Every structure is written in structure tokens, then in C-alpha cells.
Amino acid sequence: MITRRDFFRQVPARAADTLRQMGGGEMVSASGLFDMPQERLARAIPRFTGRKWIVRGGNRLYTTVADTGEEILLIPLDAVDHALLACFGDGRDLQRIAEAVAESCSLPCNVILDKASRLFLEMARHWVCIPANPL
């Protein structure tokens, strides 16, 4: 028989197991994203968190600090980054986004995927964009 104390100690692990079974993959911590191999990160489906972000000057992506409203420069953007950003949140994973953007520019898909991953990770670092799926 399981004690009440043991039951409550097991709840988080059991909940994680259930989520893993339901989603078909592992849940990843935010810090785990940055150590993830590229082939696994390519399966991430970007989802915006609702945190405010803005493109200023046509080529710089900013977010705001929740407490102060101060703007933080996340990353400079080029034309490819703009095309990638336009695809984030549409339900496709980074690999499919990279393939679609590669069709419209003269860069190889692996270069576009590197740029998509960099953009996604920088946005995830500031909680602007997170994976919508278990990885």
C-alpha cells in the first residue's frame, strides 16, 4: 500500500509520464532547448506566448521587460528572418518552415534551418515563443 506522502511525491512524475504518453514525446525544460540537437529542435512547432514583441526600424526584433516596460533588442533581422518570423505560429515545425522559406530564396535548407533555430531560441530565451509540442 502506498502512503499519502509517497503518493504526493509521485504525482509530478506520473503527470509528466501521462503528458509524454499523450503527446508522443518528452516535455523539455526551457534550458533544455538550448542543449538540444538540431535534428530534434527541428521538430519544434513555434507558438507565441502572448508576450509583447515588435519589429522596429524594419530590421530589429524587440520584446519588453514585464516589470518596467523597457524594450530589449532580441535579434537583428534580415529578409530571411522576416520570412521565418511570418511562418512562426502557423502550426508548422521549424523543419517545414525552413523548407518553405528555402523554396523562396537562394539559400540551402540547412542554412535556413540554422537561422530558424537561432531565431526561435532567441525568442524562447525571452519567453516570446515556445514549442507548442513535446520534443
Image: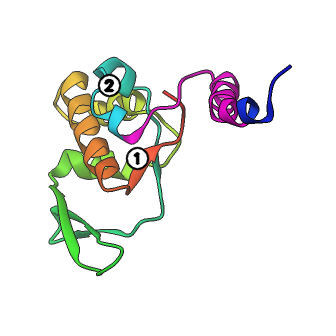
- Residue 17 colored magenta? yes
Residue 104 seen: no
Q: Which residues are magenta?
A: 8-30
Q: Amino acid at mark 1?
A: Cys
Q: Which residue is mark 1?
A: 87
Q: Which residue is mark 2?
A: 36
Task: Give the camera-side residue of 36 and 61.
Answer: 36
Instruction: Point out residue 43 in the picture as x, y percentages from the top left corner.
Output: 44, 26
Residue 121 seen: yes
Instruction: Point out residue 122 in the picture as x, y percentages from the top left corner.
Output: 25, 48
Position of 13 with respect to 86 (left or right) is right
Q: Residue at x 34, y 18 (%)?
A: 39
Distance, label 2 to label 1, CA atoms, is 22 Å
Q: Considering only vertical position in the picture, is 123 above or below 12?
A: below
Q: Residue at x 48, y 64 (%)?
A: 50
Q: Main secondary structure of the magenta part?
A: helix
- Residue 22 colored magenta? yes
Q: Secondary structure at mark 2?
A: loop
Q: Secondary structure at mark 1?
A: helix
**Mark whose residue sits in front, 2 or 1:** 2
- CB under 8 Å between callouts 2 and 1? no
Q: Amino acid at mark 2?
A: Met
